[in-house]
Image (spheres, grey):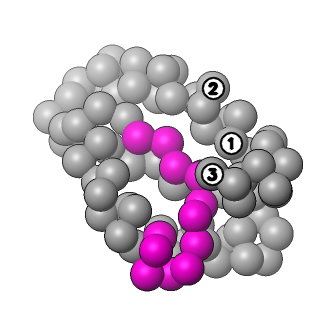
Amino acid sequence: MHDIVGLEGVGIPSVMVASTQFVEAADVQARALGADPARVFVAHPIQDRTDDEIRALADDAVDAILAALVAPAAAREAG
């Protein structure tokens, strides 16, 4: 989260990607940092998945990640 906020702060569009286990933690951390960066969550858990399952998660998330990256800054800030 710190990296995403830092990158956004210097004008580099960024998206935090994490598993659904971390939705609440991401919200808390974002509030603590006074930021609301773009976030995309994938199914949890990650560590026990096969390479094919990880590729499928990435394939499912890539459109949302790209959309968030190219969104105008105002839309990213609106969350």
* Residue at figure coordinates x 51%, y 21% from the top left: 59
Q: Amino acid at mark 2?
A: Asp
Q: Secondary structure at mark 1?
A: helix
**Label 2 belongs to which residue?**
63
Residue 55 visible in the current orientation: no
First along the sequence among labels 2 and 1: 2
Q: Nearer the viewer, residue 32 or 41?
A: 32
Q: Which residues are magenta?
A: 30-41
**Label 1 belongs to which residue?**
68
* Disc 3: CA contacts within 10 A as few (<14), some (14-19) or many (>=20): few
Provide residue 71's location: percent of width, then percent of height: 79, 43
* Disc 1: CA contacts within 10 A as few (<14), some (14-19) or many (>=20): many
**Label 3 belongs to which residue?**
79
* Residue at figure coordinates x 59%, y 61% from the top left: 37
Provide residue 45's location: percent of width, then percent of height: 19, 38
Q: Secondary structure at mark 3?
A: loop
Q: In the rendered view, would you say 76 is above or below 70? A: below
Q: Amino acid at mark 1?
A: Ala
